[in-house]
Image (tube, rainbow, N blue to C red):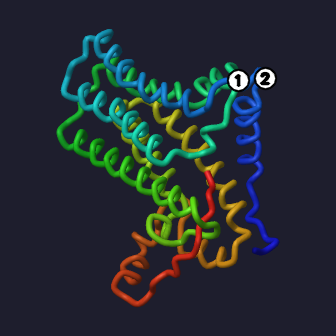
């Protein structure tokens, strides 16, 4: 290990400090694992969107697609939580912490379906195809990234510069950004894009904190050059293809558990 640490921008420090104080450090006796609060949100979303469909009288093809995408995504999350959950989500928080979790984070995800359904937005076939394609890629990338991280970090510590993490240091966040992008795209409202931007900034703050942590390991500078913090630029600039058909094979070093 080295003494060097990648700096965390001030804005990210402030955002994470506020989040941790209001959720993990909220007054009151810790009574609920944060995963219980999140999992309830995932379970309830399917029925809430169905209720929105009934309330708005919107049973269009697009409405059923939105229900399938966001509603069933929650159950994909539950399968992931059962198979390889993030241990940090087992930390307990107070009742106020649960309330703040919804106010600051997860409840805002319910805005996009309501904006879509209540305004009876009609999407074309190609637009529905695009939303479904982006959402599907997002779910797969997120789960694959979390799965690799869980099983590698369970037994080893260090940099993880192979597999899903070879060209992006945060495939799990990349996947989440893609699937939430699809909801904002379907909603077609500035407020849904504002929520998307807010959550992306929050994810970016988490990524900056992770970079700060893993930058102490040998090989960090090389890994930083070959990978994007979230976007796998090597897939677009030709480097990934040169690696695929050339002789560049990354050494599979150990990995550290980071959120």
| Secondary structure at numbered mark 2 | loop
Which sits earlier in the primary sequence, circle 1 or circle 2? 2
* Residue drawn at point x = 39 percent, y = 20 percent: 114
- Say if residue 34 shows up in the picture: yes
Q: Which residue is mark 2?
A: 27
Q: Position of residue 20 (x, y in %)?
A: 73, 37
* Residue drawn at point x = 59 percent, y = 74 percent: 223
Does 168 sit above or below residue 44?
below
Q: Position of residue 57 (x, y in %)?
A: 25, 11
Of residue 257 and residue 56, the one placed in the foreground of this image is: 257
* Residue drawn at point x = 75 percent, y = 74 percent: 1
Of residue 83 and residue 94, the one placed in the foreground of this image is: 83
- Say if residue 191 shows up in the picture: no
Question: In the picture, residue 183 is in which quadrant?
Answer: top left
* Residue drawn at point x = 71 percent, y = 48 percent: 12
Judge left or right: residue 218 versus residue 122: right
Mark count:
2
Q: Which residue is mark 1?
A: 94
Does 252 sit above or below residue 50?
below
Judge left or right: residue 122 versus residue 93: left
Q: Residues within 10 Å of mark 2 (few under 14, many from 20)?
A: some
Q: CA distance from mark 1 to mark 2?
A: 7 Å
| Secondary structure at numbered mark 1 | loop
Q: Position of residue 28 (x, y in %)?
A: 77, 20
Would you say the residues marked 1 and 2 are in contact, meaning their CB atoms lie under 8 Å apart?
yes
């Amino acid at each position: 290990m080295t003494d060097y640490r990648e700096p965390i921008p001030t804005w990210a420090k402030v955002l994470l400090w506020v989040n941790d104080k209001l959720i993990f450090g909220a007054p009151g006796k810790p009574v609920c694992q944060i995963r219980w609060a999140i999992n309830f949100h995932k379970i309830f979303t399917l029925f809430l969107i169905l209720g929105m469909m009934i309330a708005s009288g919107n049973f269009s093809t697009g409405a059923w697609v939105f229900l399938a995408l966001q509603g069933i995504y929650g159950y994909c999350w539950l399968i992931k939580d059962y198979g390889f959950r993030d241990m940090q989500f087992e930390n307990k928080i107070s009742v106020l912490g649960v309330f703040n979790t919804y106010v600051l984070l997860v409840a805002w995800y319910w805005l996009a379906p309501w904006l879509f359904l209540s305004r009876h937005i009609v999407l074309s076939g190609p637009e529905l195809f695009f939303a479904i394609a982006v959402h599907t890629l997002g779910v797969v990338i997120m789960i694959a990234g979390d799965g690799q991280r869980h099983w590698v970090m369970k037994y080893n510590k260090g940099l993880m510069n192979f597999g899903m993490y070879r060209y992006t240091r945060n495939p799990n966040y990349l996947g989440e950004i893609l699937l939430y992008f699809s909801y904002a795209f379907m909603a077609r409202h500035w407020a849904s894009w504002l929520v998307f931007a807010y959550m992306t900034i929050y994810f970016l703050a988490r990524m900056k904190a992770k970079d700060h942590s893993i930058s102490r390991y040998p090989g960090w500078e090389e890994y930083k050059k070959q990978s994007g913090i979230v976007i796998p630029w090597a897939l677009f600039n030709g480097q990934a293809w040169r690696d695929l058909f050339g002789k560049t094979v990354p050494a599979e070093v150990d990995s550290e558990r980071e959120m």
